[in-house]
Image: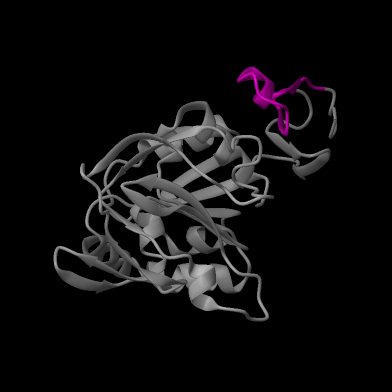
Amino acid sequence: MCARCDGTVVQVRQMAGLPTMALVLRSGGCPGTICRDGRVCHMQAPCVTILSYGSGNVRSAVRALERVGARVTLTSDPRKVTDADGLVVPGVGAFGAVMGQLWKVDAPRLIEQRLAGGRPVLGICVGMQVMFDRSEEHATTAEGLGQWPGTVSRLRAEVVPHVGWSRVRPPEGSVLFDGIAEERFYFVHSYAATQDPAELLGPGPTRPPRATWATHGQDFIAAVENGALCATQFHPEKSGDAGAQLLRNWLTTL
């Protein structure tokens, strides 16, 4: 166990019938303490900012993160974006429209500033897609944030959009999918990155991004873990217990 703090240790993984990896101390001296693999990651609930820039309904993400122990702020205030323990970049709709909204709140600079300082960022759905170089959506090319090489393109499948629950194939040693590698996650998308950014980057001095894969008509990238920057094509906040555990796993990295 990590610590007692004169409180009750709630084994959140055990509640779902899964092996216990992440623990949350709910009562006693240190409410919200988050632990992982026998070590204390946070003695109090980590502060997470969800970037507010007009991208659809993000209340489900707020509630999901609060349920797994985070203190959540929904804002585009530059100071709160840069000072938070973790930043979540949500995204729904067209790639180009999302990029336009991000520019209006100076998000590209703020995201780059966080990553340069090793401050964690989590992209969700189109919030993951914009981390790539560009998108070919609606027969036009829109430039992304360029954190990873690659182009987001329309899925080659009999049924598009891809809506529903799918299994994923994470790399060995994944932090995001620790203990939930065999679970299903909820996807809603027509476009995806399909080339491994690590292969596009080639060998180099830095640790390459690690891709998690899924299949809908073709293989596509379901998630990426790359130091301070992580992202998922699926919606963890809509993925039930598995999605909640993925968010807990991310909180332990903050």
The residue lying toward the viewer, choosing from 196 and 142, is 196
Span of residues in magenta: 7-27
Residue 36 is situated, as x and y percent measured from the top left of the image, at 75, 40
At 61% from the left and 52% from the top, the residue drawn is 171
196 vs 94, left or right, is right
Was residue 10 drawn as part of the magenta stretch in this picture?
Answer: yes
**Rendering colour mode:** one colour
Was residue 21 drawn as part of the magenta stretch in this picture?
Answer: yes
Q: Is residue 66 above or below residue 119?
A: above
Residue 70 seen in render:
no
Q: On the image, which quarter does residue 95 sit in?
A: bottom left
Residue 132 is situated, as x and y percent measured from the top left of the image, at 40, 68
3 vs 112, left or right, is right
99 vs 221, left or right, is left
Residue 3 is situated, as x and y percent measured from the top left of the image, at 85, 32
Q: Is residue 185 above or below residue 222?
A: above
Residue 96 seen in render:
yes
